[in-house]
Image (cartoon, rainbow, N blue to C red):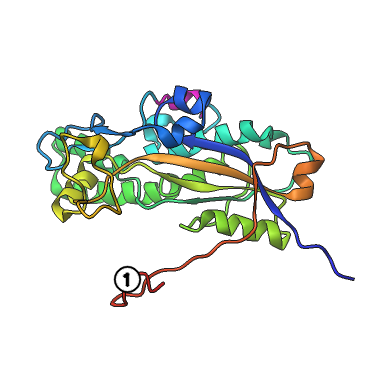
Amino acid sequence: MLVAPRRAVVTGLGFWRRTESALQNSRRHLWLARVVGPITLIDASSFSTRIAGEVKHFDPSRYIALSPIKLKKMARQTQLALAATDLAFKDAGFDPQHNGNGAQIPVVIGVSSSAIDVIETWQIVCVRKGLPGSALRRGFLTAACNRQRNHREPAVQDAKPYHIHRVPAGLDAIASAVDLIRSGKADLAVAGGADAPINTLTCASFCCSGLVSKRNDEPERASRPFDRHRDGGIMAEGAGIVVIEELSHALARGAHLYLEICGYGSSVDAKGAEDASG
């Protein structure tokens, strides 16, 4: 007997990209808002690029009360991921702490950078205290180990406050979550991406690489990836999380269906190959 394939649908959305009011009042503003402006999170006055896409008016304490990790010890990208997950669960009308069947809920989150802000903060403290070089080296190793345990993947902290299961994250996070739904390994999954690269070390590195735009006087026109006059990309922070469910599971609890994910593709251009060969 043929068994109908399991279908994956999106039932919850959680985004953090501009301001709380824009995201809470209208998701349409998320796509229309001009998010690029002068960098305020750090002193970028000496950088060739002094603009980026920052999340404004973000208060993580409103969304991360359940986390066992103190906010000041938590990487900003993790804070953004947790806040977006909280919004996604609320939007889906699903409370993971009162999950009726007790099934584990996978969390798949892709990140492009590590928690540099955590290590950078620790290094500044060490320099101010005048620790000798050997102590600094030992401290960096300790910070790196702690970062791997607590900060490297937002999925790690995302799972803790909700008592849910996590799986390894990747850039194809949503596709991986869909596979979990279709294979029957989960009826509901959390997936998305988060990043917060606006710190001194990362910004300095990108400026030295020449990969970011220098249109400091017109930030609203700086992001133009397909324009012949483009002069580089734009660094930005944010998080986007979705709740993905198996169709019958979502219908059984009366969830709102945003869309069905019917397929996906994943490719990469090989080194040395022609453009877009992937």
Identify the secondary structure beneath mark 1: loop
Q: Is residue 110 left or right of residue 215?
A: right
Q: Position of residue 98 (x, y in %)?
A: 73, 34
106 up-or-down from 127: above or below: below
Q: Is residue 47 left or right of residue 223?
A: left
Q: Residue at x 17, y 32 (%)?
A: 43
Judging depth in this view, the residue of 193 and 251 nearest the camera is 251
Q: Residue at x 52, y 27 (%)?
A: 26
Residue sitting nearer the eye, 242 or 161: 242
> Outermost residue, right direction?
1
Can you say which quadrant of the picture contains the C terminus?
bottom left
Question: Which segment did they paint magenta?
Answer: 58-63
User: Does residue 275 appear anywhere in the picture?
Assistant: yes
Q: Quadrant of the N terminus?
A: bottom right
Residue on which disc 1 sits: 275
Percent across and percent down for residue 276 are: 37, 69
9 magenta-colored: no
Residue, x 41% and y 34% (percent of image)? 32
In the image, residue 228 above or below residue 74: below
